[in-house]
Amino acid sequence: MEIILVGYMGSGKSTIAHKLSEVLNLKMIDLDEYIVEKEGVNIPEIFKKKGEIYFRKLETKALEEIIQSEKNYVLSVGGGTPCYGKNIELIIKNGISFYLKASIQTLNARLLKEKNSRPLIKNIQDQDLLEFIAKHLFERNPIYEKTSHTIKIDGKDVQEIVEEIILNTQ
């Protein structure tokens, strides 16, 4: 079984993927971690030294490699991954895909706490973050919603979300 989690940054994809992989006894793959391991440098450094376009190409290549070489996994992809190139089609065709949907307010509260580790938002003023998220989600929601399932995560703990995903894989 191949389960692929998508959603905006801060939606909990990595956390949910870790727990889900434990419960289902599947390999957990985080696309960003996979890229960091292959490149030998962290994501903010890739953005800083080579730019977002370079990173997006790396991301697509890494996604293709994982899909072609791995079986029985839970894959967590970056928030922008589905939005570039043919990535959403790869995701939809090669696993059971889930959009972890969070409200703008939930995402804003989470991302304010971790802005410095997020290259896309680290230079945005705190008071402007909510509007930035809202604009991004307006653009990305139609892509995210192409997934097999949408799981609303607001007000739910990790276990509840994992159980809902499992119900939708049977």
Image (cartoon, rainbow, N blue to C red):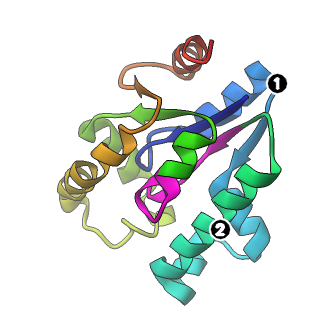
Q: Is residue 63 magenta?
A: no
Residue 79 vs residue 4: left or right? left
The front one of 91 and 54 is 91
Q: Is residue 46 visible?
A: yes
Q: Is residue 82 magenta?
A: yes
Residue 86 vs residue 8: left or right? right
| Quarter of the figure with the C terminus | top right
Residue 87, horizontal then vertical, whole percent: 51, 56
The residue at 67%/59% (across/down) is 64
The residue at 25%/67% (across/down) is 125
| Quarter of the figure with the N terminus | top right
| Mark-to-mark CA distance, 1 and 2 | 26 Å
Give, as a single range, the part of the protein colored magenta.
74-88
Residue 116: mark: none
Residue 40 vs residue 167: left or right? right
Mark 1 vs 2, N-terminal side: 1
Residue 69, horizontal then vertical, whole percent: 81, 52
Q: Quadrant of residue 162?
A: top right
The residue at 52%/71% (across/down) is 56
The residue at 50%/32% (across/down) is 98
Residue type, label 2:
Lys
Residue 60 vs residue 118: left or right? right
Residue 61: mark: 2
Disc 1: CA contacts within 10 A as few (<14), some (14-19) or many (>=20): few
* Residue under pointer 1: 25
